Image (spheres, grey):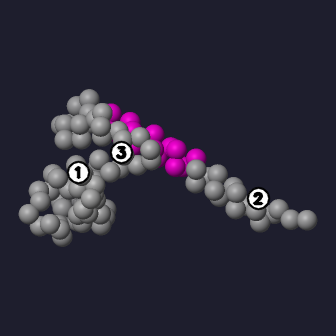
Amino acid sequence: MKRDVKIKDIFGNKHQTATIITDKNGLQVENKNPSYASDDDFVSNFLRDCINMDQWQHSWHTSVREAKVQGSQERKRILEILNGKILDRERQIQELKDAKKILRLWHY
């Protein structure tokens, strides 16, 4: 996977960009802007933005940095949050597809 990411800094007023790559060599962060920021900062900020999608700010109650430790409670909690968001979106996408079908067939 190669993903260009745009993340908000911790205060939410500036954006940072990078390319996160996962392949047979593991995890890499390239094209960082600002270039001096650590790879861990980009990865943890990306994960924070993902778990904070929608209304609830999960990162207020979950330590993203502690999720770096495999098997940690925080890692399990973040995985649970992400899986829930994926399920919700899958349902929403199916509803939207159904709505398109219904709209096509809806007429006098």
Quadrant assignment, res 15 = bottom left
Residue located 29% across and 63% down the image:
6
Judging by the rendered image, the residue that carries numbered circle 1 is 10
Asked whether 30 or 58 is in front, the reply is: 58
Judging by the rendered image, the residue that carries numbered circle 3 is 51
Judging by the rendered image, the residue that carries numbered circle 2 is 102
Q: Residues within 10 Å of mark 2 (few under 14, many from 20)?
A: few
Q: Amino acid at mark 1?
A: Ile
Q: Are marks 3 and 1 in contact (CB under 8 Å)?
A: no
Q: Residues within 10 Å of mark 1 (few under 14, many from 20)?
A: few
Q: Amino acid at mark 2?
A: Ile
Residue lying at the far right of the rendered structure: 108
Residue located 63% across and 56% down the image:
96
Quadrant assignment, res 33 = bottom left
Asked whether 95 or 53 is in front, the reply is: 53
In the structure shown, which secondary structural element does the residue marked by tag 2 occupy?
Answer: helix
Query: Up-down: is 8 above or below 91?
Result: below
Residue located 35% across and 50% down the image:
50
Quadrant of image for the N terminus: bottom left
The stretch of residues the image draws in magenta is 77-91
Q: Residues within 10 Å of mark 3 (few under 14, many from 20)?
A: many
Query: Up-down: is 54 above or below 66?
Result: below
In the structure shown, which secondary structural element does the residue marked by tag 1 occupy?
Answer: loop
Label 3 – label 1 distance at C-alpha: 14 Å
Q: Which secondary structure class fits the magenta region best?
A: helix
Asked whether 13 or 40 is in front, the reply is: 13
Q: Is residue 79 magenta?
A: yes
